[in-house]
Image: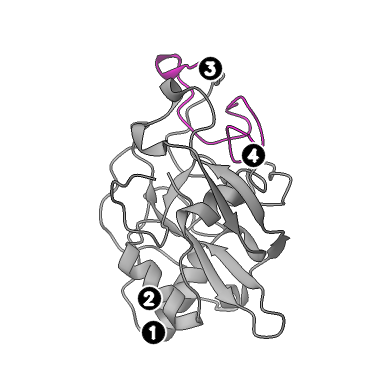
């Protein structure tokens, strides 16, 4: 899945500021179904509204976009591999949290996202956010969603040939939140724990760019419309 990233142009130096913003819990690994209740946020104190967004700088460059491994390991729409160039930008080190999204909802009197039962909201990624909601968040703060190319470049640590967003070739359950059951074992995963729920931001080590959660956990939005095309 493409990582949803929010981009803002910095008028001072022309660079772009990027935020990761969630869409929904990934369902390819049999996540439980969550009811559409309102998220439970503790409003007894509003100190969480001051939660700041941490950014890291990403040098732009050219890379080969698409499935650079054996075609049997990916989907047809990850081909053909093609050269893409992206400009330098800043990206948030973590996904947008419930607290940060709640602040936007409070200011704009917008409906809160549905909660995930049994999970604390503090430092959790904001989930069950539609593309329209993500766009509204971006528009309010002067951001935009990224192209798929921008996300893939960041997830691959500046366009390197790496299989996962943490820079590793093997998915390990202690480093990525995914379904590590034996049933889903592949040549590039380790059998182990399946948490069956999202985890907080910074639960696992970042990639070499300083970005957290660029594989697993939840799905995110990109700017592009999905359509079939030929290069």
**Cα–Cα span, label 2 and label 3:** 40 Å
Q: Choose mark 2 or mark 1, whichever is in front.
A: 2
The residue tagged 1 is 108
Q: Choose mark 3 or mark 4, whichever is in front.
A: 4
The residue tagged 3 is 191
The residue tagged 4 is 166
For the N terminus, give its image quadrant.
Answer: top left
The residue tagged 2 is 136
Label ID, residue 199: none
**Cα–Cα span, label 3 and label 1:** 44 Å
> Is 114 left, or right, of 139 in this rendering?
left
First-in-chain label (4 vs 2):
2
Residue in the foreground of this view, choosing between 160 and 209: 160
First-in-chain label (4 vs 1):
1
First-in-chain label (3 vs 1):
1
Task: Give how far across and how far down residue 21 sits, in percent.
Answer: 48, 61
Magenta stretch? 161-187
């Amino acid at each position: 899945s493409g990582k949803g990233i929010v981009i803002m142009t910095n008028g001072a130096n022309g660079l772009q500021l990027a935020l990761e913003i969630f869409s929904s819990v990934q369902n390819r690994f049999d996540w439980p179904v969550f009811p559409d209740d309102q998220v439970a946020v503790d409003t007894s104190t509003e100190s969480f509204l001051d939660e700041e967004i941490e950014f890291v700088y990403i040098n732009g460059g050219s890379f080969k976009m698409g499935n650079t491994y054996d075609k049997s390991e990916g989907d047809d729409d990850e081909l053909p591999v093609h050269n893409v160039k992206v400009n330098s930008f800043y990206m948030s080190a973590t996904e947008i949290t419930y607290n940060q999204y709640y602040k936007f909802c409070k200011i704009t009197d917008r409906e809160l996202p549905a909660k995930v039962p049994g999970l604390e909201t503090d430092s959790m990624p904001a989930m069950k956010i539609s593309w329209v909601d993500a766009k509204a968040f971006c528009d309010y703060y002067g951001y935009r969603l990224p192209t798929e190319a921008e996300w893939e470049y960041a997830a691959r640590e500046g366009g390197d040939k790496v299989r996962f967003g943490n820079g590793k070739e093997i998915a390990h359950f202690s480093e990525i939140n995914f379904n590590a059951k034996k049933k889903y074992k592949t040549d590039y995963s380790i059998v182990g724990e399946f948490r069956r729920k999202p985890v907080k931001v910074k639960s696992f080590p970042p990639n070499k760019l300083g970005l957290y959660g660029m594989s697993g956990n939840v799905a995110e939005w990109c700017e592009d419309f999905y359509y079939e095309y030929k290069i």
